[in-house]
């Protein structure tokens, strides 16, 4: 299975790192998650913000699709979202930038342990998959809308 | 808040108290979180990290580490048998209570919780650092045994407890208790086949014991919930459970240290064991 080119570069980087550096790089990506928020003046084809009442926090997914069907994601995270999920947010926003809607939809989740390492993907850190699921959901909704518009 | 009103006021300290004791060599500040990387993003100066999964649980059997492994966890973190361990963490101190409970399983005496946990410390603008401490290695003697029989309950204990009509407290969210959901809202499934609760269990969500800032409610408020509201009392034999034992550790701490109940056990197998186990009976609804 091939991944979008930018995501593949990130996967390659992590796979080459020893565990301690992997951890430090994840923290560095987590620090960059705030920069993935929607910016002043940006417009989006789809916005989806939801809150989990007991454990996590609000996650807002903002999807822009250009005329060539290439995506750009922005994500807004509440303050209680886990560090690993923050890291994955920055990784996925960068990794999917410029990919097609279909490429995002087809990305399997098996790259997550390759980036994060098997030690960190475990019970109560499974929300690391959550952002990917939400991004794919946004793409699916966008595609359904596009298909419906064509039928109309 | 005045901690002196609690049954064991020495078991709870404020953020101010911790700030004044950061350099005290007889004290070790211990961070335990659900967020696996949170400690690495910044922690209290001098705090060590003890992870509920990789440090405290056996990596092959679903059980806790052995006494000799516990001695090694303590020794490498500069914790001796007389060290006072002050636990704090995320999620309203779920995992710090869990770590404290495991320390008590091995008989470590001097344990405290920082009221309000990590969020309160951060909200007050107190310092965090990414520098990992280098405390000198301690020499923790291997505890003679793990005190499972005293503060831990297993499936068979819990089953008999319910059948005997003894108090059984389910501390999960109401939706989990009623069996409407088998996972926490919008959280991934954590591997349980059936929703519901242990027959005869009473729903008292852990959250009822805390204020909005994650500090514990006053003794008077806690007595209204547990003593007057549930008919519990210090002499009763009580078992608490949740999904994997962390939220029930929180309630175990409340009942044991803040209200002074003498016999409270944590069923750490909790719903991920009970809900999956062949031939285990369940109840749904209220």
Image: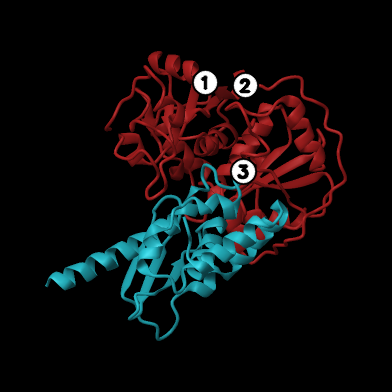
Chain colours: A cyan, B red
Can residue B215 be seen here? no
Residue, far front: A1
Which one is nearer the viewer's eye here, B251 or A1?
A: A1
Q: Quadrant of residue B167?
A: top left
Residue at numbered disc 3: B96
Residue at numbered disc 1: B154
Compared to B247, does B231 lie above or below? above
Residue at numbered disc 2: B148
Structural crowding at the residue carrying mark 3, measured as other residues with C-alpha within 10 Å and reported as few (<14), some (14–19) or many (≥20) = many
Disc nearer the start of the sequence (3/1): 3
Compared to A99, does B182 lie above or below? above
Mark 3 on the same chain as mark 1: yes
Can residue B234 be seen here? yes
In percent of width and height, residue B65 lies at 68, 29
- Which residue is found at the position 49% from the left and 16% from the top? B157
Disc nearer the start of the sequence (2/1): 2
Q: Quadrant of residue B46?
A: bottom right
**Which numbered dot is residue B47?**
none
In percent of width and height, residue B250 lies at 54, 39
Distance Cα–Cα, label 2 vs label 1: 9 Å
- Which residue is found at the position 46% from the left and 41% from the top? B206
Q: What element carries label 1?
A: loop
| Left or right side of B185 for A123 | right
Q: Which chain carries label 2?
A: B
- Which residue is found at the position 72% from the left and 62% from the top? B129
Compared to A98, does B88 lie above or below? above
């Amino acid at each position: 299975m091939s991944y979008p080119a930018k995501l593949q570069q990130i996967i390659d980087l992590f796979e080459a790192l020893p565990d301690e550096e992997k951890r430090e790089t994840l923290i560095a990506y987590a620090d960059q998650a705030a920069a993935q928020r929607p910016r002043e003046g940006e417009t989006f084809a789809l916005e989806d913000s939801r809150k989990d009442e007991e454990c996590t926090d609000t996650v807002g997914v903002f999807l822009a699709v250009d005329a060539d069907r290439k995506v750009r994601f922005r994500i807004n995270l509440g303050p209680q979202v886990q560090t690993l999920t923050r890291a994955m947010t920055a990784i996925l926003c960068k990794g999917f930038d410029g990919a097609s809607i279909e490429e995002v939809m087809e990305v399997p989740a098996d790259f997550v342990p390759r980036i994060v390492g098997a030690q960190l993907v475990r019970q109560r850190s499974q929300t690391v998959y959550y952002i990917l699921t939400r991004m794919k959901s946004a793409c699916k909704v966008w595609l359904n809308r596009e298909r419906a518009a064509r039928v109309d | 808040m005045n901690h002196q009103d609690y049954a064991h006021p020495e078991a709870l300290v404020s953020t101010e108290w911790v700030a004044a004791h950061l350099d005290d060599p007889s004290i070790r500040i211990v961070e335990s979180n659900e967020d696996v990387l949170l400690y690495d993003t910044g922690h209290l100066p001098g705090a060590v990290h003890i992870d509920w999964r990789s440090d405290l649980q056996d990596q092959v059997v679903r059980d806790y580490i052995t006494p000799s492994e516990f001695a090694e966890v303590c020794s490498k973190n500069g914790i001796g048998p007389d060290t006072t361990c002050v636990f704090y963490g995320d999620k309203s101190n779920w995992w710090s209570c869990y770590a404290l409970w495991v320390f008590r399983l091995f008989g470590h005496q001097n344990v405290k919780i920082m009221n309000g946990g990590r969020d309160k410390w951060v909200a007050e603008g107190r310092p965090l650092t990414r520098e990992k401490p280098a405390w000198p290695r301690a020499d923790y003697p291997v505890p003679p045994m793990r005190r499972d029989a005293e503060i831990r309950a297993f499936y068979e204990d819990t089953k008999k407890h319910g059948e005997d009509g003894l108090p059984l407290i389910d501390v999960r969210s109401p939706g989990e208790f009623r069996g409407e959901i088998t996972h926490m809202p919008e959280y991934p499934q954590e591997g349980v086949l059936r929703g519901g609760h242990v027959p005869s269990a009473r729903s008292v969500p852990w959250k009822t014991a805390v204020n909005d800032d994650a500090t514990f409610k006053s003794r008077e408020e806690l007595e209204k919930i547990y003593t007057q509201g549930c008919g519990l009392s210090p002499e009763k034999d009580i078992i608490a459970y949740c999904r994997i034992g962390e939220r029930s550790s929180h309630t175990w701490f409340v009942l044991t240290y803040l209200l002074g109940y003498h016999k409270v056990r944590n069923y750490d197998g909790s719903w991920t064991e009970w809900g999956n186990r062949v031939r285990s009976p369940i109840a749904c609804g209220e």
